């Protein structure tokens, strides 16, 4: 906690305002310290919001985070209800997941977007079923399939151990890269403090150009602390309703096609009045559309430009697509978790052929989202104290490596004492219903949404539970 706070130039004395539950691990049944991860990242996001509020108003406050509540919030997409009902459908596509390869290794494929799924089926020349995909993948070696699929912009990673990942060129490119980085990219006057605000980010305008968990969680967190967040999505991409509904709460939503000169011009006008530009395109992906960091900074001096990518900036995988589950598989976390569970069960399996065991939550995505919010808040603080325009960088792979750096628990503690997540059922488990809050859906006839409340508790500026837009095209592309 303190190392990440201090590494980004924030005042050491402010750490005393943060109160964390003791013994955060094992908060869940994992060999990785996910209680620490959840409590730390949510705590950093909240504490940096409190510091920003102090800089703007002179009002200090304490912040507290319970580790189990934080770990449950790391699966927030699993616990929401619409009008008392679980959302219909599955978060995962039918063929997404792990498959054995010809060289007795494994690959993980991510097919939640229809065009990614069709690309995999076309490459394998097989039918749309797990059995057919497994038969086809058995004709490939793991890294051969990963390389060829990735060259076609498909979402695949080969299963690696920590040692195999450490020897990989992309791992070397990420060596010593922290999970969140701040860079001053241009000069600008210090931000004016303005009038007294009731929430840390009240009056802060955020453009959120992200999809699927990490980026949207960052935007949702900023909205919870009072920011006006406008979620911009491409009409060219399909929606992911089960995830989109929960992670877009508190935001306004509008589609813009950046390949359209008219829509690109609209975004440019929005940028001129924005305070934060949050995006999750691959490195340099928005530069070609005239919305890279330099272009945005010229439109709006003093802006905070926050970027999320899968594998970082630089290295042979810089431009590869990636999601949490793929990164877990690629960097060795899936193997290490499987090995620890094998030790716990005393199954005596061959460690070289153990199928990867995913973490019990999308911990890399959630941690990256809160670290993005932390970095954005820290940068906003710097616009007050130092001035300038700032870039915030977070990559899933660097966050995964940070989670690894915290070490692993003894398997007997991890899986013997760690509490599994409750089932996703109705009626909801007691610990979920005890933490639930009800919010309005933005469309009149949609009723209510019940969600798990935010784990961060701020003494004087409790989080704001905004409306849930439910769809990605509900609002006009303008500021309120």
Image (cartoon, grey):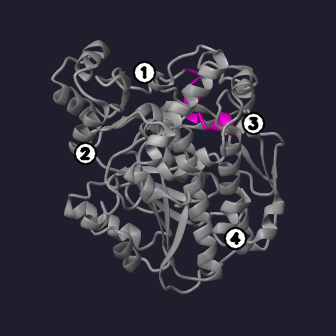
Label pair 3/4, CB-CB below 8 angstroms: no
The percent coordinates of residue 269 (x first, y second) are 35, 70
Q: Which label was assigned to residue 10?
A: 4
The percent coordinates of residue 275 (x first, y second) are 50, 69
The percent coordinates of residue 10 (x first, y second) are 69, 70
Residue of label 1: 89
**Does 180 sit above or below residue 246?**
below
Residue of label 3: 25
Instruction: Give the label, 4 or 1, closer to the camera.
Output: 4
Number of numbered discs: 4
The answer to whether residue 136 is left or right of residue 214 is: left
Give the mark, 2 or 1, whose residue is nearer the N terminus.
Answer: 1
**What crowding class fits label 4: few (fewer than 14 Cα within 10 Å), some (14-19), or many (20 or more)?**
some
Instruction: Give the label, 4 or 2, closer to the camera.
Output: 4
Tag 3's secondary structure? loop
Tag 1's secondary structure? loop
Q: For this rendering, which residue is in front, 112 or 272?
A: 112
Give the mark, 3 or 1, whose residue is nearer the N terminus.
Answer: 3
Query: Residue 473 is drawn in which quadrant?
Result: top left
C-alpha gap between disc 3 and disc 1:
32 Å
Give the mark, 3 or 4, whose residue is nearer the N terminus.
Answer: 4
Residue of label 2: 236
């Amino acid at each position: 906690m303190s190392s990440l706070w201090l590494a980004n130039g924030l005042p050491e004395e402010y750490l005393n305002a943060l109160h964390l539950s003791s013994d955060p691990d094992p908060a869940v049944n994992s060999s990785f310290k996910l209680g620490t991860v959840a409590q730390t990242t949510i705590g950093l996001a909240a504490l940096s919001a409190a510091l920003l509020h102090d800089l703007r108003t002179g009002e200090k406050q304490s912040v507290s985070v319970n580790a189990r509540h934080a770990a449950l919030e790391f699966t927030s997409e699993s616990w929401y209800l619409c009008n008392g009902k679980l959302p219909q459908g599955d978060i995962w596509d039918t063929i997404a997941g792990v498959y054995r390869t010809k060289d007795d290794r494994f690959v993980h494929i991510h097919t939640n977007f229809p065009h990614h799924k069709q690309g995999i089926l076309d490459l394998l020349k097989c039918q749309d079923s797990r059995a057919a995909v497994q038969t086809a993948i058995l004709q490939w070696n793991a890294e051969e399939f990963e390389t060829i699929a990735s060259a076609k912009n498909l979402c695949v990673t080969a299963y690696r151990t920590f040692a195999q990942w450490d020897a990989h060129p992309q791992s070397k490119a990420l060596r010593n890269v922290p999970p969140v980085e701040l860079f001053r990219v241009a000069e600008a006057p210090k931000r004016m403090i303005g009038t007294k605000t009731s929430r840390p980010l009240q009056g802060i305008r955020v453009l959120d150009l992200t999809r699927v968990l990490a980026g949207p969680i960052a935007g949702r967190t900023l909205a919870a602390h009072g920011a006006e967040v406008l979620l911009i999505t491409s009409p060219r991409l399909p929606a992911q309703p089960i995830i989109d509904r929960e992670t877009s709460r508190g935001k306004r939503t509008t589609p813009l096609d950046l390949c359209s000169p008219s829509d690109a011009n609209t975004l440019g006008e929005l940028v001129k009045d924005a305070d934060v530009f949050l995006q999750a395109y691959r490195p340099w992906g928005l530069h070609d559309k005239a919305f890279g960091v330099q272009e945005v900074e010229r439109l709006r001096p003093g802006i905070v430009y926050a970027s999320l990518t899968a594998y970082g900036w630089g290295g042979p995988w810089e431009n590869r697509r990636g999601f949490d589950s793929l990164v877990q598989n690629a960097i060795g976390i899936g193997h290490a978790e499987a090995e620890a569970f094998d030790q716990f069960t005393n199954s005596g399996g061959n460690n070289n052929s153990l199928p990867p065991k995913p973490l019990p939550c999308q911990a890399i995505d959630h941690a990256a989202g809160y670290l993005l919010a932390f970095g954005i808040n820290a940068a906003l603080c710097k616009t007050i104290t130092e001035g300038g325009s700032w870039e915030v960088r977070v990559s899933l792979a660097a966050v995964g490596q940070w989670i690894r750096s915290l070490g692993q628990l003894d398997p007997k503690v991890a899986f013997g004492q760690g509490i599994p997540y409750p089932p996703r059922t109705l009626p909801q488990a007691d610990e979920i219903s005890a933490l639930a809050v009800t919010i309005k859906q933005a469309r009149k006839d949609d009723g209510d949404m019940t969600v798990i409340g935010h784990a961060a508790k701020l003494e004087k500026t409790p989080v704001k539970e905004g409306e849930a837009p439910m769809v990605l095209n509900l609002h006009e592309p303008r500021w309120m």
